Image (tube, rainbow, N blue to C red):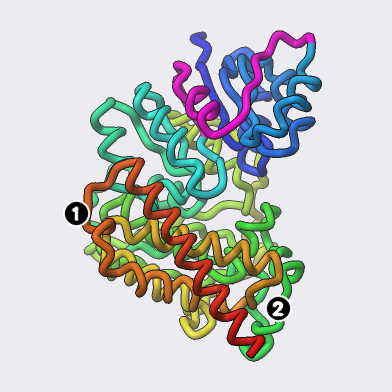
Amino acid sequence: MTRRRVSVFGATGSIGGNTLDLIGRAPDSYDVIALSGGRNVALLADLARRHNAQIAVTAYDDCLPALRDHLAGSGIDCAAGAGAIVAAAERPADWVMSAIVGAAGLAPGMAALKQGATLALANKESLVTAGTLLMETAKRHGAIVLPVDSEHSAVFQALIGEDIATVERIVITASGGAFRDWPLADLARATPAQASSHPNWDMGQRITIDSASMFNKALELIETHEFFGIAPERIEPLIHPESMIHAMVGFVDGGIMAHVGPPDMRHAIGFALHWPERRALPVERLDFAALGQFTFRAPDEARYPALRLAREVMQAGGLSGAVFNGAKERALDAFIDGDLGFLEMAPVVEETLTAMAGDALLSGQMTLDTVAETDHLARVRAGEAIRARQSKRQD
């Protein structure tokens, strides 16, 4: 059996951990090339030793001495910084997991595609900020992009053997997040701690808060548009509290394919890892009689204004996705730090989109540099909007 060379960027997060769980169950099938992580260098080093990685990279320069100490005597290379992560992604690999959170995941994902690797994409910001660039790069280098978000993996699987021209609608389901049953009037007082507790999934703080605000789902609507080329008006969000149906694809004959499975990310990860084969996975088998029923509700855009903003971004196209994501990340930082209320995040993003709508940068060519410049400028403009709100409160 030929051993596959694999790298995992974002190895210390939940997606990375689940990926390495599956890889570790078949150690004779894989050679681990590179692992990256953040400040949890003890875990990063442990994973690198456990999987005999060639190199471990931390995103933070100041963490490099500690990473070196943890890897002393192992023979595993170590490095730090964004450039080092890109360099690690340039090492030849057959399959690469892109699970770095935020816009920082774009450059290493692009580097992997340029090596002709199969890119398992869990970093939704790559498609949101630079979908056209990412997909064109994959095509140019004969690389493959496989979706790892559970919703997009579900759509991908439902489309196997189907003609995309026969797709009438795509329904992307959402749990509704931590506040799905809260009275709307109470959301203004919601705290980061309350927003960080997801009813169905065990995820990191940032993505869990994004789930509560539906910014996560807004990003996924844009992802669907970029990955599958479906018109924005054919993409529908739907709240499904049980999180068992991950997506549905409706066809021109009125039929609908629904992908159903337990809320376990190892399914989508395993599908991408083993594609084009389908192999056994250590996930729960559903007991439909015990489940009893599935429920659905339409999302209230007054509660979730991020969904409306996503539609506007899809219609605008170009680099507007980079503005949306950069402003969203800056607003999320401010909410976590206590500088912005939960219901103020969407207005800050909207104000940033409006302020940058006529910027010449947005009508230019999409490159890694222009995406990065747009992201930076969006964060600056969002910061200005946040400070203006703070100043108004103090007056």
Q: Quadrant of the C terminus?
A: bottom right
Secondary structure beneath disc 2? loop
Left or right, 22 with respect to 219, comes to: right
Circles 2 and 1 in contact, beta carbons < 8 Å: no
Amino acid tagged 2: Ala
Determine the residue positioned at 29% across, 34% down: 137
Which residues make up the magenta segment? 73-97
Q: Residues within 10 Å of mark 2 (few under 14, many from 20)?
A: some
Residue 162 in percent (x, y) is at 27, 47
Residue 272 in percent (x, y) is at 48, 35
Q: Residues within 10 Å of mark 1 (few under 14, many from 20)?
A: few
Amino acid tagged 1: Ala
Determine the residue positioned at 24% across, 51% down: 164
Q: Is residue 199 visible?
A: no
Q: Quadrant of residue 275?
A: top left
Residue 110 in percent (x, y) is at 39, 34
Of the image marks 2 and 1, the number of the one nearer the N terminus? 1
Question: Residue 152 colored magenta?
Answer: no
Q: Which mark is residue 190?
A: 2
Determine the residue positioned at 35% across, 32% down: 144
Q: Which mark is residue 321?
A: none
Say which of 346 and 32 sits in front. 346
Tag 1 residue? 165
Left or right, 128 with respect to 342, comes to: left
